[in-house]
Amino acid sequence: MKYDAKLKKIITKEWGNEFPTLTILKPTRLIRRNGPILVGICLDRESNPEVYKPIVHIHNLCYIDSDISISLAGYVLSDKGLPTVVKLKYHSETFLHFVQKIKLDYPFTDKSEMSFNDIVVATQKYVTGRTAPYQHKPYNDLITIAAYLGKKEYALESLENFSAIISEWPDRAFNIIGSVDKWRNSLLELIDNTDKLRETVDQEIVKHKLVKFMDNGLIWPEKPLNLWEMPCKPMFA
């Protein structure tokens, strides 16, 4: 049994039945729009054609991207904390276990409404997991999403706190962002220009053929969580 085009369609539909707030974008991809973000589940193929790997993700539309990224990737983990896969020959017997585990670990996948705090918690889970350290994009996303929602004060506070964190990174961490000041100034420009953020989101919706997808909105919580106050030591730092 191989994860071919026909089987991908069947399995994606079965997953869609278990997550009614998500919509099939294409085989292996389920998504939902909440304001400037896309929440999704990717039923990713592996080098082994007899398995697939479910991945929860949150894509930020505030940035121009060639595809819908698997950002803040979240997996169904084994007892040892390693990502697990669904074996196709046991799919019917086991995929509901994966579904329930995702609903437990990522409850925002099973509801239409979503709070900014859901993104903060997902970000903490990601940066403390088995991922490469010194990633600036999770910080970019929280800052730009807050700015998009009109929460400039929170975005600026986040920028200052994340700048302090990034300034302690080793030199090898700045291959992409160049320097803390360069990174900070690029974010300041976006915070001060929310019209540009909204324009980018609108353009990305058209580009990725999401116009027909309903916007379920993104709630700003009464007490927003501050990632910089939460335990965030990367597993591999």
Image (spheres, grey):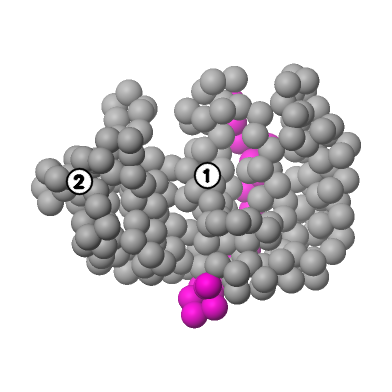
Residue at the disc numbered 1: 72
Kindly identify which residue carries mark 2.
2
Percent from the top left, x then y, of residue 213? 48, 76
Q: Closer to the camera, 132 or 97?
A: 132
- Specify start and end residues of the magenta stretch as a single range: 209-233
144 vs 1, nearest the viewer: 1
Reply above or below: 135 against 171: below
Which amino acid does the dot numbered 1 rest on?
Leu
Measuring from the top left, give residue 32's x and y in whole percent: 46, 66
Q: Nearer the viewer, residue 138 or 91?
A: 91
SS label for mark 2: loop
Q: Is residue 84 left or right of residue 94?
A: right
Look at the image and say whether residue 215 sits in the magenta stretch: yes
Residue drawn at x 74%, y 35% is 176
- Count the marks: 2
Is residue 149 highlighted in magenta?
no
Q: Amino acid at mark 2?
A: Lys
